[in-house]
Image (cartoon, rainbow, N blue to C red):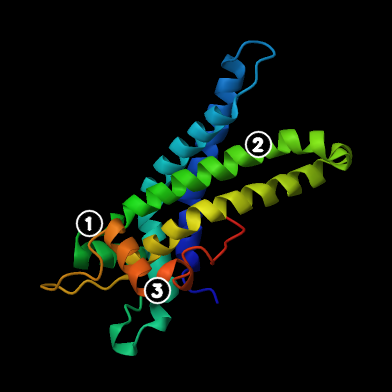
Amino acid sequence: MYEGVTAAYLRQWTYGSCRLGMYSFALDYLTKAKAKGESVTFVEKMGMGCVSGGIGSFIGNPSELALVRMGGDSRLPVDERRNYKNVVDCIYRTAKEEGLPALWRGATPTIIRACLLSSSTLAVYSEAKARLPLYIPILKKTEVGTMFAGTLVSSLVANILVNPFDVVKSRIQSMKVIPGQAPPYSGMVDCFAKSLKKEGPWVSQLFLKLYLVY
């Protein structure tokens, strides 16, 4: 149940902390730069979330790739397993056996996913937290309730937008590339097309698999 946990930690230390830190810094900076009484708009929040998520995901892509590979290794046939010891071993062997650029395999859908995730999660959460008490009076009495409701709304929106890219990203990063043979997917668009053609938008779980905590 804890396969790839070292990669999960590294992913949070790089991607997770990076996007949250940059978003918080940008939000605080823009709030102070605004004229007195003027608030940060929803579009500005989405823009800051998008930029912070994109930068964070690029930095954290090697750990994301390691997490996907280590978490799915036990599902492969015995003779095809990579048997990584930990995230350091995975990153080192990937760079050594497949080349340094391989650590950023699947970076395009990863970055798009992160931009959508961060802009929707962070911006929608901030907006929902400010607006929900106006429509649901009971939330005015409890900060915890407002935070919980804002999280539910932002998670719903984020997962609807992000999940297709999450599936494609995982498939590209976990695919086994054999030297001299064409890889299963040539890129993000090819993976999308083949997944939809072979399995359909619902059977392929492009819109079914939900992650409520990021």
Label pair 1/2, CB-CB below 8 angstroms: no
- The image quadrant where one finds the N terminus is bottom right
Local SS, label 1: helix
* Front tag of 1 and 2: 2
Measured Cα–Cα span from mark 1 to mark 2: 38 Å
Image coords of residue 48 (percent x, y): 50, 32
Which numbered marker is on residue 199? Answer: 3
Name the amino acid, label 2.
Ser
Query: How many other residues sit within 10 Å of disc 2, few (<14), some (14-19) or many (≥20)?
Result: some
The residue lying toward the viewer, choosing from 93 and 74, is 74
- Asked whether residue 158 is in view, the answer is yes
Classify 68 as above or below 37.
Answer: below
Name the amino acid, label 3.
Glu
Label whose residue precedes the other's in the sequence (3 or 2): 2
Residue occupying the point 39% across, 73% down: 199
Label whose residue precedes the other's in the sequence (1 or 3): 1
The residue lying toward the viewer, choosing from 59 and 169, is 169
Measured Cα–Cα span from mark 1 to mark 3: 32 Å
Label pair 3/2, CB-CB below 8 angstroms: no
Image coords of residue 95 (percent x, y): 24, 61
Residue occupying the point 36% across, 83% down: 76
Tell whether 40 sits left or right of 86: right
Image coords of residue 15 (percent x, y): 46, 48
Query: How many other residues sit within 10 Å of disc 1, few (<14), some (14-19) or many (≥20)?
Result: some
The picture quadrant where one finds residue 73 is bottom left
Residue located farthest toward the bottom when viewing the structure as drawn: 78
Local SS, label 2: helix
Label whose residue precedes the other's in the sequence (1 or 2): 1
Which numbered marker is on residue 100? Answer: 1
Local SS, label 3: helix
The residue to which callout 2 is attached is: 126
